[in-house]
Image (cartoon, rainbow, N blue to C red):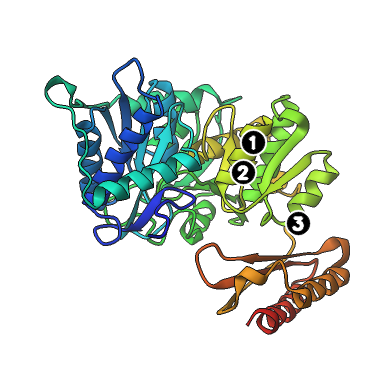
Amino acid sequence: MGRLFGTDGVRGVANADLTAEMALGLSVAAAHVLAEAGTFEGHRPTAVVGRDPRASGEFLEAAVVAGLASAGVDVLRVGVLPTPAVAYLTGALGADLGVMLSASHNAMPDNGVKFFARGGHKLADELEDKIETVYEEHRTGAPWGRPTGAGVGRVKSYGEGFDRYVAHLIGVLPNRLDGLRIVLDEAHGAAARVSPEAFSRAGAEIVTIGTEPDGLNINDGCGSTHLDKLKAAVVEHAADLGIAHDGDADRCLAVDHTGEEVDGDQILAVLALAMRERSALRSDTVVATVMSNLGFKLAMEREGIQLVQTAVGDRYVLEEMKDKGYALGGEQSGHVIILDHATTGDGTLTGLMLAARVAETGRTLKDLASVMERLPQVLVNVPDVDKSRVATSAELATAVTEAERELGSTGRVLLRPSGTEPLVRVMVEAADIEQARSVAGRLADAVKSALG
């Protein structure tokens, strides 16, 4: 069996890949694994369960709740809330486990199951592996030990989760947003109520789009993966800025007052400078992945901020931050982690902090984001090659060396085998887009020749 857990839980087409039986089985397995690890020792266990608005989340939530309760875990159902809200509430309520049902930015037919450990942190890889092993053992026939009578879990709705999470967001803001007009695109997703409420309470005048989830329209032509509607709305309403989230609101991308996109790298740059001013940027360091734009790296060097880079994936950014005690990290895609206030990427928190910087300085977002210049970046996928030999091919190493010599200090090359497909990703950055395309094309040919 291939590994069920990816970098962000278990995902697939709901009712095809991810069935009610699987959701129930994984939840029971998680309860047993955590019990064996001693997480529940000395007390009655509790789990927080939330979901995004996908139609399939309704039956998958029922399956997860049934599985946990059948394993003796009391369940607090918080309903439709962002992924970071479920993580926050897991920690704030002292729960032993959190479960979020969402496929994030994926299309509506997909869904996913994501587990949080006590404190609202992502489960360690070894626990995910153990859950998967135990799930598979029992899926093929091994009986579960089941509590009876008063030992079964009880299920309650926890409607206070909404206000508690919004109050947390408002409470960590360095300043209010009075005087700002902000357009919010909620992707018809999990933040459709939370984000407008938070921005309004913080003092902003808001215009909203993508705030009418019907279970079918999540991420459909809106949100952080489709910025055109937000760009048009910001210009139409003469707004100071626009904020876009994805379906589970762990991402944030922005739009300045002219309708230009502000990506995750630029958001990180703006927040890094703001946090350093408040002495909140520990070790004057920000963490990002190797896919961050070279312009971000050059800007941080110029500003005297150290950049630590990790493998692609917000979980690797988070691991580095926790290991070294850094306060800020993220990805170009808009996953931004502010570790003093969140245990995972939080799109609403990121948007609030970005808007707070605009309000505090009186500068436009366009001006603030100009701290870095995005260098042209070209990405080419080379399919049907032996991706396992990327690091060992002498022919490919020679081609990369030649490309790096041509680009010099104002360019960059990255060759990365895909984690899910038989292809190699070729990424080239350069001061000039035509040079980037030319170098990327030659390197793609070299990959075909060396690994085909």
Q: Looking at the image, is mark 2 or mark 3 earlier in the sequence?
A: 3
Position of 21 with respect to 6 (left or right) is left
Q: Residue 222 appears in which quarter of the rendering?
A: bottom left
The residue at which mark 2 appears reads as: 317
Please indicate, yes or no, whether residue 396 appears anywhere in the rendered image. yes
Give the amino acid type for the residue marked by disc 3 in the picture: Leu
Q: Residues within 10 Å of mark 2 (few under 14, many from 20)?
A: many
Residue 24 in percent (x, y) is at 24, 44
Compared across the picture, whether 241 is left or right of 209 comes to right
Give how far across and how far down residue 84 sits, in percent.
45, 36
Front residue of 76/230: it is: 76
404 left or right of 23 in image: right
Q: Looking at the picture, which amino acid does disc 2 mark? A: Val
**x and y percentages locating residue 308 in the rendered image:** 73, 43
Q: Which residue lies at the image location 79% right of the left edge and 76% below the top edge?
A: 399
Residue drawn at (53%, 72%) of the image: 422
Disc 2, disc 1: CB below 8 Å?
Answer: yes
Give the SS element for disc 2. Answer: helix
Q: How many angstroms separate mark 2 from mark 3 (CA)?
A: 17 Å
Secondary structure at numbered mark 3: helix
Name which residue type carries label 1: Met
| Residue under pointer 1 | 321
Which of the two marks, 2 or 3, is nearer to us in this view?
2
Disc 1 crowd rating (10 Å Cα; few below 14, some 14-19, many 20+) is many
Residue corresponding to mark 3:
294
